[in-house]
Amino acid sequence: MTQMKNIVAKFAVEGTVTDIKPLGPGFINDTLIVKTEEGPKYILQRKNHIVFPDVPGMMNNIMMVTEHIKAKVAAEGGDPMREVLTIVKRKPESISAQEADLAYNDLYYKDEEGNFWAMCTFIEGSVTYEKADTPALAYKGGQGIGKFQAQLSDFTTPLSETIKGFHNIRWRFQQWEEALKRDAAGRVKDLAEEISWIESRKEEMLGFWSLVENGTIPTRVTHNDTKISNILFDAEGEVLCVIDLDTCMSSTSLNDFGDAIRSYTNTGAEDDRDLSKVSMSLEMFKAYTEGYLSERKDTLCKSELEWLAFSARYITFEQVLRFLMDYIDGDTYYKTNAPDHNLVRTHAQYKLLQSMEEQYDVMVGIVTNF
Ligand code: GN1
Ligand code: MG
């Protein structure tokens, strides 16, 4: 507690700190809630610098993105302290001579052990959901991400790439070729069928990505983790803001739509052993898409609309590839709970991909008819 208090003391927190406690599950960062005698609460996070090798660049991304949204919210008469995250900066006097040369040194504190700490305000009365169970909630989730993207549709400053080539399938195929060649776990010989799922779609996936590379599909701010638990709602169930901005990067906004569809619409689990449970729910697709487009119809360009439905196949395909590649590598990236866990995930995501491919014409129709 004393150690934590000393860390918090480096930041421009108002009030006297009374309590610091862990918050939420969090697989990547450690998140704590900081309470003060006077009332305001804060979030303190230890940022995972193994997953995010450039924490200063990442914090600067978050600062730029939140400042841009704040200006928009204020101009529209909203509440910039509730409708976007607020980073708490360092107290200028706490920045030591040794820290003077560190990039963006007012946005984080690096302790003696090399851990990075950052703070933001806690939004009082906010509510989160672990899963989108109903089309009504999926619609709201779509609105949340749509609004976030619309607020950033005129943000053109390139962001630091916090995870290299995250949704770049050309880069993923490069990693894929290397993984096949290495065959680190000796599993390739048993995977002829699964490997053919990847190889048979290579051209169409690279074809899509080349439209991003040649600028036909514009590069914007992408969130890259668009699950419903990353949206804060108010007590009335209205969207307040999008959180967990660590993976914000510059790429195609279609990534965020595609990944949301991958997670919201699955009737089974991401790692379901019972493939009969796995499919894409068109009802959930329709609800999310309508919520999303209600916020974005004026700011998306023609090519984005044209490829919107396809992006769900793209991201789901990429996930099949990433799970299979990790299985081939001997399970080094994703946490697993069984020796075949990554293979089970591969099969379940492939089933979801097939379900999307089968219903693709209807998906396109829903987008077109909006
Ligand atoms: C990881 O840990 P989580 O659920 O936020 C992964 C995503 C995958 C997801 C699959 C940084 O996200 O890209 O889609 O697992 N995040 C990273 O469950 O690799
Ligand atoms: Mg995440």
Image (spheres, rainbow, N blue to C red):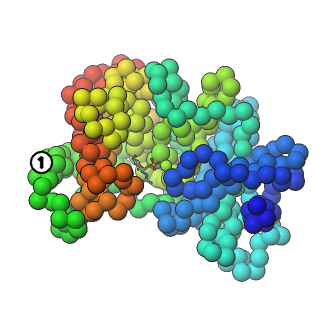
Placement of the N terminus among the 4 image quadrants: bottom right
Placement of the C terminus among the 4 image quadrants: top left
Percent from the top left, x then y, of residue 291?
Answer: 49, 25
Vertical order, 334 against 72 (above or below): below
The residue at which mark 1 appears reads as: 193
Asked whether 313 or 233 is in front, the reply is: 233
Percent from the top left, x then y, of residue 108?
Answer: 67, 64
Residue at x 87%, y 53% (from the top left corner): 16
Amino acid type, mark 1: Glu
Determine whether the residue tagged by mark 1 lies in a helix, strand or loop.
helix
Percent from the top left, x then y, of residue 96?
Answer: 77, 76
Residue at x 23%, y 59% (from the top left corner): 328
| Residue 353 in view of the camera | no
| Residue 285 in view of the camera | yes
47 left or right of 268?
Answer: right
Residue at x 33%, y 41% (from the top left corner): 271
